[in-house]
């Protein structure tokens, strides 16, 4: 497993690291293997931290983008125990923190800074798209103004953009659990992540 450690050999100057597939019968220990890999990446990369994001499919709940909704709920700290207003306030707080953190990357005139600046603009533009995936809505927002096709295409763009922003801060490992249950929309999004992302350190498991 240690052979997988140098997947981002150049840090922030790294490239898209591709995909790794974990195959095996049910109960053989695939989840445990991925957990050990996550711990290994975190403990052996102290000089080059990585962000590990988890997404899980659902055999029964085959709704569009379902594994990414799972990811976003944890990313924006959403809870079923909160009221809608509480979740919306938490989302706003985390969204603003993300914008501020990403802004540090966008300072200066380097290619990375200029790219990050464009990504932040896109993040702000698609805020309501990300919120809608979590059941959060704003009147007269971009989401409200789009038709079904526009919402679909912008959802793919918004989630991809979020992961690109994170990869500008530090390398990203995106773990997709039980990908054989992947819905059609999520499959298209995963495929889209390989388009024009050569210079972003992202690794998909």
Image: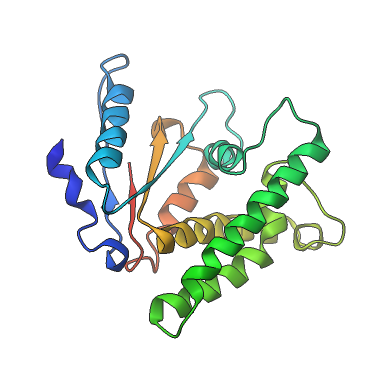
Q: Which corner quadrant of the image does residue 88 belong to?
A: top right
Seen as rendered, the residue at the extreme right is 139
Q: Residue at x 35, y 49 (%)?
A: 50
Seen as rendered, the residue at the extreme bottom is 109
The answer to whether 15 is drawn above or below residue 43 in the figure is below
Q: How many marks?
A: 0
Seen as rendered, the residue at the extreme front is 47
Q: Residue at x 18, y 51 (%)?
A: 6
Seen as rendered, the residue at the extreme top is 27
Q: Residue at x 25, y 23 (%)?
A: 24
What kind of colouring is applied to the model shown? rainbow
Image coordinates for residue 193, horizontal then vertical, percent: 42, 57
Q: Is residue 151 left or right of residue 55?
A: right
Image quadrant where one finds the N terminus: top left
Q: Is residue 113 left or right of residue 35?
A: right
The answer to whether 156 is drawn above or below residue 120 in the figure is above
Image coordinates for residue 29, horizontal then vertical, percent: 27, 19
> Viewer-proximal residue, 189 or 74?
74
Image coordinates for residue 87, horizontal then vertical, percent: 74, 39
Q: Which corner quadrant of the image does residue 113 belong to?
A: bottom left
The answer to whether 196 is drawn above or below residue 96 in the figure is below
Image coordinates for residue 68, horizontal then vertical, percent: 54, 42
Image quadrant where one finds the C terminus: top left
């Amino acid at each position: 497993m240690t052979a997988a450690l140098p997947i981002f050999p150049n840090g922030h100057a790294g490239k898209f690291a591709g995909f790794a597939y974990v195959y095996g019968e049910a109960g053989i220990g695939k989840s445990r293997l991925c957990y050990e890999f996550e711990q290994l990446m975190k403990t052996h990369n102290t000089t080059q931290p990585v962000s590990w994001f988890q997404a899980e499919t659902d055999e029964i709940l085959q709704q569009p983008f379902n594994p990414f909704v799972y990811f976003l709920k944890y990313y924006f700290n959403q809870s079923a125990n909160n009221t809608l207003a509480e979740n919306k306030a938490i989302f706003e707080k985390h969204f603003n923190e993300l914008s501020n953190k990403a802004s540090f990357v966008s300072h200066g005139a380097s290619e990375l800074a200029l790219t990050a600046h464009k990504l932040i603009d896109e993040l702000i533009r698609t805020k309501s798209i990300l919120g809608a995936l979590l059941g959060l809505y704003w009147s007269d927002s971009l989401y409200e103004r789009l038709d079904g096709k526009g919402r679909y295409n912008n959802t793919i763009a918004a989630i991809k953009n979020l992961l690109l922003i994170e990869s500008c801060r530090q390398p990203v490992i995106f773990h997709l659990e039980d990908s054989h249950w992947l819905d059609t929309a999520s499959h298209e999004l995963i495929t889209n992540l390989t388009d024009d992302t050569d210079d972003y350190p992202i690794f998909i498991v």
